[in-house]
Structure formats: structure tokens, C-alpha cells
Image (cartoon, rainbow, N blue to C red):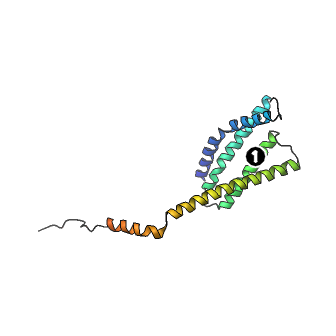
Amino acid sequence: MKSFTSQFVFRGLVAMGFGPIVLAIVYLILKQSAVIDTLSVNQVCIGIASLSALAFVAGGMNAIYQIESLPLMTAILIHGSVLYIGYLATYLINDWLDFGTMPIIAFTAFFAIGYIVIWAIIYSAIKRNTTKINDLVNPEVMADMISAKISKKIVVAPFAKPDRY
């Protein structure tokens, strides 16, 4: 558990540095799309604090995949649930999402679709790389090379010279 906690904090702190950058990009997009003209100091402070906290949690949650005793599907469900709650809270706190049934349902649908698509891309890339590595390390092909190398390395030598009387 200590390893998970230290990894969570380390990854969270690294990701947290990108929170204000992401916030600046979000605000620029909102300004360009004429959603906002100016921001109050309060909006900027809440935005920086909430996005830094979200980045910390999102970055830190990747440490959950380091827990080997946790099944992959359980880790994915925990990771996705924590990210969903974090993103939803951030959107609501910053008034980027109206508090209502339909906006939250739409947000949930977009989040679920995005999360599944990202995981499908990651899964296919890992599977492709694993297959490529497995094809390179074919035991039937490697057996002759390994046994040839082993037989060359086998040397019969005395452990010690016997004493002569």
C-alpha cells in the first residue's frame, strides 16, 4: 500500500503541473467560441484549484494499475469511476455544465464513450505489440539456437589441481 500511495502522490504531482495549462486552453476555447468575454478573479482561482486537483487525481489514479493483486477489470472500473466523479465535479464547480438531469446524462454518455474508445485504442496497441514480441520469440525456432549456445558454453574443467606427493 505504501508503494501505491507514493506512486499516486508522485504521478499526481507531475500531472498537477499541467492543470493550469489545461485550464488556460479551456478558457481560450470558451473565449474563441464567444461563451465568455471576461473572467472574475474568483472564476480563475476556482478554475486553477479545481483543475489542479483533477489533474492530481487523474495522474495519481494511474498508479492503480501497479497493484498486481487487483484484477484488470476491477482496476479499470475504479479508475473510470474516480475519473468520472472528478471530471463531473470539476465541470459543475466551474459552471461548465448546467446542473440538471439531461446535461449530466449527456456528460455521462460522452464520458463513457470516450473512456471506452481510449481503452479500446490502448488495448489494441498493447495486443499488437505483445503479438509482435511473441512472434519474435518463437520457442520452436529459438530452441536450436539456445541449445547450440549452451553446448558451446559447457566446459569440462577440474575444480582444483590435485596435490602430488
**Residue 135 horizontal side relative to residue 23, left or right:** left
Q: Give the quarter of the figure containing the C terminus.
A: bottom left
Give above or below for 155 relative to 5: below
Residue at numbered disc 1: 87
32 w.r.t. 114: above or below:
above
| Total numbered circles | 1
Q: Position of residue 139 (x, y in %)?
A: 47, 68
Seen from the viewer's position, the closer of residues 37 and 15 is 37
Q: Position of residue 124 (x, y in %)?
A: 64, 58
Badge 1: how crowded within 10 Å, few (<14), some, or many (20+)? some
Label 1: state its secondary structure: helix
Q: Residue at x 69, y 46 (%)?
A: 57
Of 43 and 154, which appears nearest the observer?
154
Q: Position of residue 83 (x, y in %)?
A: 72, 49
Query: From the viewer's perspective, is residue 46 above or below residue 135?
Result: above
Farthest-out residue, left: 165
Residue that appears at 60% across and 59% down:
128
Q: Nearer the viewer, residue 135 or 85?
A: 135
Q: Is residue 143 left or right of residue 106?
A: left
Q: Residue at x 81, y 36 (%)?
A: 33
Write down the quadrant of residue 126 in the picture.
bottom right
Q: Identify the amino acid type marked 1.
A: Tyr
Q: Is residue 31 left or right of residue 152?
A: right
Residue 93 placement: quadrant: top right
